[in-house]
Amino acid sequence: MPLDWDKLRVFHAVAEAGSFTHAGETLALSQSAVSRQIQALEEALSVPLFHRHARGLILTEAGETLNRTVRDVFAKLAMTEALLTEGRERPAGRLKVTTTTGFGGSWLSPRLHRFLEAYPEINVSVVLDDADLDLAMREADVAIRMHAPRQPDLIQRHIATFAWRVVGSADYLKKQGIPQRQEDLDAHRLIIWGDYRPPVEDINWLAEVGRRPGQARRGTVEVNSLNGMLRAVQSGLGLAALPDYMGHELEGLVTVLPELKAPKINAYFVYPEEMRSSKRVSVFRDFLVSELTGNSN
């Protein structure tokens, strides 16, 4: 018996939402209608797809197997639909972009208006996440990452190299003194990244510079947000190394130890092979390169 696409669509929504009620809200169906569709699908397959309990629904082993396939099929269908409906003359349609919270908030978001003025028929959705979303599973169309892609079968282009700035507030440095050598950092309060999903490789290099391996300086405070680290520096809490793509947000802070040997941050524009011919992707890539190379004000 062939599987019913409508029932599979409902099943996928329930599997992602974890409840009939929430899936019904997404699909604009009643809870009872969703429940009937799932029951009919289970009867057609002669296997239970969900464990029902008071707190919601959990996929059975059979349900997990079916959902992996259904998720992949619907992701590929969405990508195909987007490519087929893309305008022949003007880039148009939805473009889902993912990047880190720091780069997306500090650099990308303030510049998006220029892209949308040039391409008003493109609808941009930005997902800020310090974890890598799965482009092959269509969690996003394209990504801007601060490291070379680890996922196979992705097209990548190196688009920029960024540096770090070690910064502190004028008030803090007036009280604690300006470090003249890397060894002087031992006497300063450091604000470092917490251990959750670092968006940039070697992000805590400031704690390690000038120290033996395994003997890094301890941070006075750990924050898993570049914006949070910036705010802590501005408040006079201590010193931090922040990417120079934060640009104007670093104004008002004092840069110290500019001669320190710091790792570079390499940024890549990444997208799946299926998106190679997408006009939306190509014009967005060109926009990024133009902005990053200073060809746009």
Image: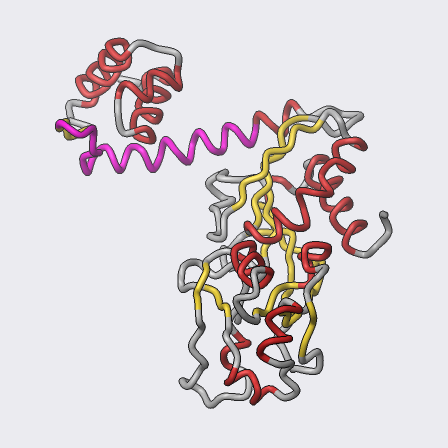
- Horizontal side of 25 relative to 34 (left or right) equals right
Residue 239 appears in the figure: yes
- Horizontal side of 233 relative to 285 (left or right) equals left
- Residue at position x 56%, y 60% in the image: 235
- In the rendered view, would you say 41 is above or below 296? above
- Residue at position x 32%, y 28% in the image: 17
- In the rendered view, would you say 110 is above or below 228? above
x, y percentage for residue 61? 19, 38
User: Which segment is the magenta one?
Assistant: 54-80
x, y percentage for residue 100? 55, 51
- Residue at position x 43%, y 63% in the image: 194
Q: Which colour scheme appears in the figure?
A: secondary structure
- Residue at position x 48%, y 47% in the image: 133
- In the rendered view, would you say 186 is above or below 230? below
Residue 274 appears in the figure: no
x, y percentage for residue 16? 34, 31
Q: How many badges with numbers are in the image?
A: 0
